[in-house]
Amino acid sequence: MDELRRQILRDLLGEANINLSEDQDEAVTEFVRFMDSQDFRATFLLTGSAGTGKTFLINLFTTMLRKSGYKVILLAPTGRAAKVITRRTKRPAYTIHHHIYAPMEGQAGQVSFSMKGNKAENKTVYIVDEASMIGDKSDGSTPNSLLADLLRYVFFEDEYRKLVLVGDPVQLPPVGHELSPALDADQLFMKHSLNVFHAHLTDVKRQLSDSGVLENAVAIRDAYLSQGEVLLHLEPSRDVMQLESPYEALETYISYYEEGNLDKVVFLTYSNFQSTRVNQGIRHHLFYTEDLLVHNELLMVVRNNYSWGDPKRLPFIANGEMGIVRDIFPETYEEKYGQKWMDVCLEFQDTKGESLMIDCKILLSLLTEKHPQLSNEASYSIFMERQKEYLGMPKGKAAELLRKDPYINALQVKYGYSVTGHKSQGGQWENVIIGFEPDYGNNALSYLRWTYTAFTRAEERVFTLNCPFWEE
């Protein structure tokens, strides 16, 4: 980059000295070319592994665009990911669902989405972080995939708008995909007719080079990219440690746990079954109770819910959202329709990180089950039972009551102390304990991607239990 370009960047960022790595320099050059282009459906794809400076460049691009008169909209696939990018960029970010869809609930509580019209002004650029999580298959709530609908929304009636997709191609892909479709430049061009400008970052930022977490994450990345030719051997350091027993792992979690601090520590597992067991063990040591629910309990929502949020601050409670039990109403406890129910008050955080209290009914039964969420059969059975409650009423009135029924719309939750590696995507915690389980030789490369995803959830420390990648 010549001195004139450096001076422009210094002026934009208000900093006296900017040190860009070679690949960051090339990414800036490609981004400028992308913004200067007159191509329709132009998309800038920024990929790179942990520590290569993707968030730094998001901040840089956003500053450049705003100084040039553009409106920038930051998006992410999940509420947790939106909060992380909001914290890192100090600018509000929103979930893709919230921004492009209007939810519609059916009588049985099932949710479908209709596309909003895009009324954004011409000089609007959409930057989507954690794009590795965006799938290209319909989940049944819309005829199209999330990726297809995102592209349809962005370029609606104006194919000269600009889109930036940012992500880590080594992270786990969306469920049902072998690769992350939103990070595949060839597929974006061939399937979705995008004109793709691509920059890939590989150099780890110098100030992070002494991080044991990052050093090992790079080793995991390289083992995966070698397609199994490089054997993975993790290296211990002051911030990457090996635990000798489940009891030591439990004690480590307890030592870092802080009530009300959602980002302090998490225990990651490979399976839902193991996560359920770990949650029970942690709860026993934290609360010394056999009760299903106590005050200050940490819960994770396991299915999107559109009934209990706040229209402005939390339009829906997303799958993966973390909440804290602030009040319990034991007189509302019930066992009916084959399930257990109770009314509670949960504290959530909106995308700005501000507290929001929500009174709602929750499904207690899932807390101790290994299943990730209520089955479709069980949901339908509850709907049919609740429908009987409104027999004899005028049809319109009955339909309205069914749509708002607290049992049909009960929040589905699990304990939030331990979650699976897949569920952790988009999140960041100061301390991460990883409980490894055998993959039984099913897919060694997929196991490496899971390991990489788990490692890169940590901001400060990683503790491993039963990890097969330590050198004997």
Image (cartoon, rainbow, N blue to C red):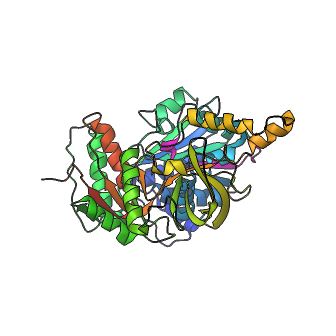
- Left/right of residue 354 with respect to residue 188 in the rendered view: right
- Residue appearing at x 54%, y 41% in the figure: 374
- Residue appearing at x 79%, y 37% in the figure: 399
Q: Residue furthest top?
A: 190
Q: Residue furthest right?
A: 394
x then y, percent, for residue 410: 64, 48
- Return the residue nearer the eye: 391 or 114: 391
Q: How many marks?
A: 0
Q: Is residue 454 above or below residue 181?
A: below
x then y, percent, for residue 149: 64, 35
Q: Is residue 59 visible?
A: no
Q: Is residue 274 visible?
A: yes
Residue 192 part of the magenta segment: no
- Residue appearing at x 38%, y 54% in the figure: 268
Q: Which residues are magenta?
A: 119-137
- Return the residue nearer the eye: 131 or 390: 390
- Residue appearing at x 56%, y 59% in the figure: 83
- Return the residue nearer the eye: 165 or 250: 250
x then y, percent, for residue 401: 78, 43
**Snapshot quadrant of residue 326:** bottom right
**Snapshot quadrant of residue 8:** bottom right
Q: Residue furthest left?
A: 472
Assign the N terminus to one quadrant of the image.
Answer: bottom left
x then y, percent, for residue 353: 60, 65
